[in-house]
Image: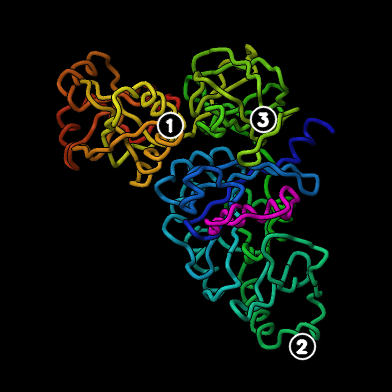
């Protein structure tokens, strides 16, 4: 198979939703239908020994939530599908934003009873900014929910783009009869399923066989047919071009927990979702250089660093989205940020926590390798060829935290373990760690309270460090820069007590009140205050 054919086989997408919309359950069922797993776990089955494949962290199993994104690769209909499950909880939205930089499309899951919820809207906005194509799956049709037409209208309003139904439900809740597949021209009759799947047992009725459909489902079929015709008549015909441009979303209905409507989504991902496309490297002068996925030279970007995936080895895995070229074991790589050489010895693909050695990887694939430092979030990695020395992918944002807490050790003898734990958790983006310029206790910065709880739990279970989290007078932060080095030095001398360095030694000004920023800006017009920075610090340096 040629190089270009291999690239075109790839589909890389993220599943996004509001918490509890059924995202992780749908992930399980996609794995089940592709043949990647044979028995599906459940997020809610907390007492069971079997948990969702994508929820591998101990705290995820305890709480029944996803707190870190996970990567799974599967093969279906000769396509290599790279699926990234993301945390739904807003406190971990940064992890989701980072994942969205590594995918070519997104599958948005919506609860049929609740419609488009606040966190979904935030994620939609990120997708819109990046021009990421979105497929929509309306879930939990086996429960009483809202009218499909009403849901479609709400999705259109939230996305700011028209919906094109690809499937349509016949009834819902106790009256749920099945799904009309408008692409295939048949109705798949509903059967409750849980852990296993056998497509041979599915009953299909051709949509042209109206007599049988009327006899089986009566009024439910008629009213569903009427609303489907109304929706299809009002909607634009599906256009691959509009979908790729993020100006149209195909919509699917189903019940993830019952394995229903999943087959249609999986087939659509193969048939409709985009293969890896051109990415842009930001040059030193700020210009953009296009890099095609089937370019000869290897390049990739580190979009995630995860510590302690294997509790026995205390390892750190760097997740890399391959942007161009082909990766083979033994390659000598270059980290563009510092020009250092990298020769990873164990490179793997993922099935959540399980790993398999990589024989080869192409654009769109997600690979991981063990790192002992030297690699940061946002780093661009290339094959080290001279003509590639100026390649730098950007777009991995780091948002200014809104909550701060101090860290105090219960056992002073564990300070080394604390330093290591905070450094590694900071590098993976689980929390932001700030070291006050004037000295004193380390500060943790977060978007939501739950992040602190997760970090505290992980410090104890993964690093053996018990610590107390204390209050802080700071209510926000801004990274600072100045065109003139002298101006920056003067600012630092006057505000030493409010300055801190983050995990990549970028300088930040810590705010003590909502008015603090405005007053400081007025006093120091020569200083630029940044609400976000690139992970590699590049945006900040350029400001």
Other-residue count near label 3 (Cα within 10 Å), few / some / many at <14 / 14–19 / ≥20: many
Q: CA distance from mark 3 to mark 2?
A: 53 Å
Quadrant the N terminus occupies: top right
Q: Is residue 486 above or below residue 506?
A: above
Q: Are marks 3 and 2 in contact (CB under 8 Å)?
A: no
Q: Residue at x 63, y 11 (%)?
A: 386
Residue under pointer 1: 425
Q: Is residue 96 visible?
A: no
Mark 1 or mark 2, which is nearer to you? 1
Q: Is residue 441 above or below residue 144?
A: above
Residue nearer the viewer, 335 or 369:
369
Q: CA distance from mark 1 to mark 3?
A: 21 Å
Magenta includes 49?
A: yes
Magenta includes 18?
A: no
Q: Secondary structure at mark 3?
A: strand
Q: Quadrant of residue 456?
A: top left
Q: Which residues are magenta?
A: 23-50
Residue 320 % position (x, y): 59, 30
Residue under pointer 3: 348
Query: Does residue 142 appear left or right of residue 156 in this picture?
Result: right
N-terminal label among 3 and 2: 2
Q: Quadrant of residue 249?
A: bottom right
Q: Residue at x 73, y 42 (%)?
A: 80
Residue 295 % position (x, y): 70, 26
Q: CA distance from mark 1 to mark 2?
A: 60 Å
Q: Which mark is residue 215?
A: 2
Q: Secondary structure at mark 2?
A: helix
Residue 428 % position (x, y): 47, 32
Q: Is residue 400 above or below residue 152?
A: above
């Amino acid at each position: 198979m040629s190089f270009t054919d291999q690239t075109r086989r790839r589909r890389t997408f993220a599943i996004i939703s509001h918490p509890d919309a059924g995202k992780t359950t749908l992930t399980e069922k996609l794995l089940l239908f592709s043949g990647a797993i044979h028995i599906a776990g459940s997020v809610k089955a907390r007492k069971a020994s079997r948990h969702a494949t994508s929820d591998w962290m101990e705290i995820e199993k305890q709480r029944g939530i996803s707190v870190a994104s996970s990567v799974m690769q599967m093969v279906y209909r000769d396509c290599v599908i790279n699926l990234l499950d993301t945390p739904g909880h807003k406190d971990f939205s940064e992890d989701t934003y980072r994942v969205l930089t590594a995918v070519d499309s997104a599958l948005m899951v919506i609860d049929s009873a609740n419609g488009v919820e606040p966190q979904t809207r935030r994620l939609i906005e990120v997708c819109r900014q990046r021009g990421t194509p979105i497929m929509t799956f309306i879930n939990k049709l086996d429960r009483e929910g809202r009218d499909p037409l009403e849901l479609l209208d709400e999705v259109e309003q939230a996305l700011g783009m028209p919906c094109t139904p690809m499937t349509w439900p016949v009834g819902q809740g106790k009256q749920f009869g099945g799904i009309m597949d408008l692409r295939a021209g048949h109705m798949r009759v509903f059967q409750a399923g849980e852990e296993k799947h056998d497509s041979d047992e599915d009953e299909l009725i051709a949509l042209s066989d109206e007599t049988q459909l009327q006899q089986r489902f009566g009024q439910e079929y008629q009213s569903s047919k009427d609303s489907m015709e109304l929706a299809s008549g009002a909607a634009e015909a599906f256009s691959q071009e509009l979908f790729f441009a993020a100006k149209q979303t195909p919509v699917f209905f189903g019940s993830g927990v019952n394995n229903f409507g999943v087959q249609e989504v999986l087939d659509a991902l193969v048939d409709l979702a985009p293969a890896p496309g051109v990415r842009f490297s930001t040059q030193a002068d700020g210009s953009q250089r296009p890099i095609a996925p089937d370019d000869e030279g290897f390049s990739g970007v580190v979009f995630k660093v995860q510590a302690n995936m294997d509790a026995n080895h205390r390892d750190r895995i760097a997740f890399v989205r391959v942007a161009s070229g082909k990766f083979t074991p033994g390659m000598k790589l270059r980290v563009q940020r510092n020009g250092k050489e990298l020769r990873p010895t164990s490179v793997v693909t993922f099935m959540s926590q399980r790993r398999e050695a990589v024989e080869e990887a192409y654009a769109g694939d997600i690979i991981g390798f063990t790192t002992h430092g030297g690699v940061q979030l946002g780093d661009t990695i290339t094959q080290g060829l001279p003509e590639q020395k100026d390649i730098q992918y950007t777009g991995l944002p780091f948002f200014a935290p809104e909550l701060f807490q101090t860290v105090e050790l219960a056992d002073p003898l564990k300070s080394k373990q604390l330093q290591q734990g905070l450094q590694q958790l900071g590098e993976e983006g689980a929390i932001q760690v700030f070291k006050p310029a004037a000295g004193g206790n380390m500060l943790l910065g977060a978007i939501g309270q739950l992040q602190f709880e997760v970090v505290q739990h992980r410090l104890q279970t993964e690093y053996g460090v018990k610590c107390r989290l204390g209050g802080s007078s700071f209510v926000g932060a801004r990274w600072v820069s100045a065109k003139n080095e002298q101006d920056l030095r003067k600012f630092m001398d006057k505000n030493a007590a409010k300055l801190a360095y983050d995990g990549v030694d970028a300088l930040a000004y810590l705010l003590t009140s909502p008015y603090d920023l405005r007053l400081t800006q007025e006093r120091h017009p020569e200083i630029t205050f940044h609400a976000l920075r690139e992970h590699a610090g590049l945006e900040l340096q350029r400001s």
